[in-house]
């Protein structure tokens, strides 16, 4: 793709602030820059703490979707998992009600300030309502903590997998050696200089791929082609635009052995389109076009829009 002019991108930019139902990743409002491109809508939503070298990949993904047509899909409907933030066990049923028909749930664990007992209670509450449960520690445990947690969290039932139990590839390999639960890699792929290192190191049983951190749908599919373990496509707390792009990416894969983490739209109070509820736990593999009235109503404050514009300028020289 020929890189567009920066001025054209900024002319097409809409920065929105999406209110969230629950705290997730420590935030209650998700800011995202949307690009109304000639080929479709793209999304730039790198988290604020990411510096330009990392955020530039997310910008590349947004530009790819906005200025280049998405590839055709093989699957028109994608199974998705429910996502349960680090809420009290008593709140689990309300969260799961936003994911009708979901047969898999991903539960956040290892939240700072919480205990393993909190995680066990949350997982137990989820397991009572959803047949398949996976957990995501976001690299928050040491190896010994991950081994202890795996035992505690499987005392009353199985786990589909442990997602990113520890931060480093050697730690993932050690956890994989010491536990009976499959290990999935997320940050070790999307935040790595070499996203294939964790797979070549045999440190994971499952690869979690996200479109934005890998630079776009085609870039993600290129990584997927080199991976010989099952793949789960997931979102990065995307708006409906990013979710649609992720669903298309998942629909391009040869097979989908696991539910994808593309149902996080249920975590928002409002979005740039009316939220589409899953049907029998699945969502359509199709891009979305935002509602102009919603985009206007959800517009970020002017100073925040300027912050995102400056961020795009900072990332621009780093685009390949």
Image (spheres, rainbow, N blue to C red):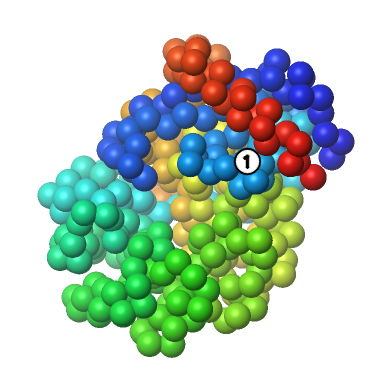
Q: Is residue 104 left or right of residue 127?
A: right
Which residue is at 41% across, 63% downward? 139
Report the residue that reaches farthest toward the right: 2
* Residue 156 visible in image: yes
Image-based side of 258 in relation to 91, left or right: right
Residue 274: x, y in percent? Answer: 44, 26
The residue indicated by pointer 1 is: 52
| 41 is higher (above) or lower (below) than 64 | above
The residue at 51%/53% (across/down) is 234
Residue placed furthest toward the left: 90
In which quadrant of the rendered image does the C terminus lie? top right
Q: Quadrant of residue 20?
A: top left
Q: Position of residue 34 (x, y in %)?
A: 59, 26
| Residue at screen point 76% across, 24% down | 6
- Nearer the observer, 69 or 25: 25
* 266 up-or-down from 235: above or below: above
Residue 68 x, y percent position in the rendering = 78, 36
Front-most of residues 13 and 258: 13
Residue at coordinates 45% horizontally, 15% vertically from top-left?
A: 301
The quarter of the image holding the N terminus is top right
Examine the rendering and report whether any part of residue 238 can be seen: no
Q: Considering only vertical position in the picture, is 301 above or below 139?
A: above
């Amino acid at each position: 793709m020929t890189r567009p002019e920066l001025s054209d991108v900024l002319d097409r930019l809409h920065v929105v602030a999406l209110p969230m139902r629950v705290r997730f990743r420590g935030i209650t409002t998700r800011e995202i820059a949307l690009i109304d491109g000639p080929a479709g809508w793209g999304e730039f939503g790198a988290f604020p703490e990411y510096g330009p070298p990392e955020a530039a990949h997310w910008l590349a993904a947004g530009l790819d979707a906005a200025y280049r047509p998405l590839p055709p899909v093989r699957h028109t409907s994608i199974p998705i998992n429910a996502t349960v933030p680090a809420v009290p066990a008593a709140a689990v049923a309300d969260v799961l009600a936003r994911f009708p028909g979901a047969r898999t749930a991903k539960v956040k664990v290892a939240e700072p300030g919480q205990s393993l007992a909190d995680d066990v209670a949350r997982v137990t509450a989820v397991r009572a309502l959803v047949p398949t449960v996976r957990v995501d520690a976001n690299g928050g445990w040491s190896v010994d903590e991950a081994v202890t947690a795996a035992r505690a969290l499987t005392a009353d039932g199985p786990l589909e997998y442990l997602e990113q139990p520890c931060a480093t590839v050697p730690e993932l390999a050690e956890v994989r050696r010491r536990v009976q639960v499959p290990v999935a890699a997320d940050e070790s792929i999307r935040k790595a200089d070499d996203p294939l290192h964790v797979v070549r190191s045999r440190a994971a049983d499952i690869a979690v791929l996200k479109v934005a951190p890998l630079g776009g749908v085609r870039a993600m599919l290129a990584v997927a082609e080199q991976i010989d373990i099952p793949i789960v496509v997931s979102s990065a707390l995307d708006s409906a635009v990013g979710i649609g792009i992720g669903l298309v990416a998942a629909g391009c894969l040869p097979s989908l052995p696991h539910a994808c983490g593309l149902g996080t739209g249920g975590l928002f109070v409002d979005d740039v389109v009316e939220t589409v509820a899953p049907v029998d736990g699945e969502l359509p593999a199709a891009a979305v076009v935002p509602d102009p009235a919603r985009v206007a109503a959800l517009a970020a404050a002017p100073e925040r829009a300027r912050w995102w514009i400056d961020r795009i300028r900072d990332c621009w020289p780093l685009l390949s």
